[in-house]
Image (cartoon, helix red, strand yellow):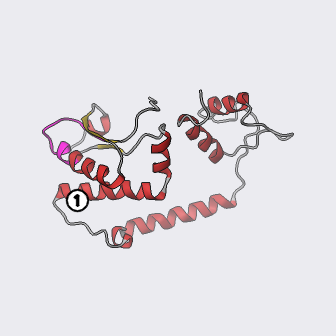
Amino acid sequence: AANKKAYGCETFCYATGTSSEKLAKSVQQHLVSETGRLNRGVKTGNFAVIKNTKMPAILVETAFIDNYEDNRFLASEDGKKACAMAMYKGILDYLGEDYNTESEDKLMSKEYDELKETIDKIKERAESLEPVIYNYVDDNMPAWAVPTITKLVNKGFLQGDENGLNLTENLMRQLVINDRAGIYGE
C-alpha cells in the first residue's frame, strides 16, 4: 500500500472510548511535538495486532517510508531518537508516571544493554563472514528484490562487469527501499 504523497504520523487504536484510545492520544501528542511531523491524528483500525488483545494496544505509524522526506527523517539518528522519545513519553503519561530524559543511560534497562551486547556480537560474527554476492537476476536472487533490480538494470542504473552485478543482500535492500521511496522514478 504505497502512497508517495502521504506524510506525517498517525496512531491507530481498535475502538474509540477505550483505554487504547487514551494511550493512542497520549503517544500521538508526543509524536507530533517530538518529531515535528504532520499530525494525521488518532484513527481506528481493524488490525489484528490491536484488535485481539487483553491490554491497551496501539499501532504507531511514525512516518511514511515511501515519502522521500519522511524516509530521510526515519533513517536519521535524530529521527529515530525523536520517535522513541515520543513513544516513551506518551506511554509514561498514559500510565501517570514521571519520565527522566536527562541522560540516555537512564533510559536504558539492563535487558536492553544485554540485548545490545548480543546484537553487537552477532554483527561482528556476520562481518567476518563473506557476504553472499548476487550476480544475476535469476532464481537465486530473493524474490522481493527482483522487480527493483530488473528495473534498475533496464534503466541502465545498474550495470555489471564480467563477474555480473556483484550485489549483496544489504545493498539490494537499500535499492528496494529507495525504489519504494520513488527515487528511481516509475
Q: Which image quarter: residue 115?
A: bottom left
How far across and down, in percent of the image, does residue 119 sit?
Answer: 52, 61
* Residue placed most toward the observer, 43 or 127: 43
- Asked if the stretch drawn in magenta spans residue 15, the answer is yes
Give the residues in magenta. 10-23
Residue drawn at point x = 25 percent, y = 49 percent: 29
Left/right placement of residue 119 relative to residue 143 reads left
**Count of marks placed on residues:** 1
* Residue placed most toward the observer, 85 or 131: 85
* Residue placed most toward the observer, 62 or 185: 185
Quadrant of the snapshot with the C terminus: top right
How far across and down, in percent of the image, does residue 3 sit?
Answer: 44, 30
Residue drawn at point x = 21 percent, y = 46 percent: 25
Quickly name the residue at label 1. Answer: 92
Q: Given the image, on which type of amino acid does mark 1 rest?
A: Leu
Left/right placement of residue 109 relative to residue 55 reads right
Residue 56 in view here: no
Outermost residue, left side = 17
Residue 107 sits above or below residue 169 on the image: below
Residue 149 sits above or below residue 116 on the image: above
Quadrant of the snapshot with the N terminus: top left
Left/right placement of residue 35 relative to residue 185 reads left
Residue drawn at point x = 38 percent, y = 70 percent: 104
Outermost residue, right side = 162
Q: Secondary structure at mark 1?
A: helix
Residue 22 in view here: yes
How far across and down, in percent of the image, does residue 134 sit?
Answer: 73, 40
Residue 142 sits above or below residue 84 on the image: above
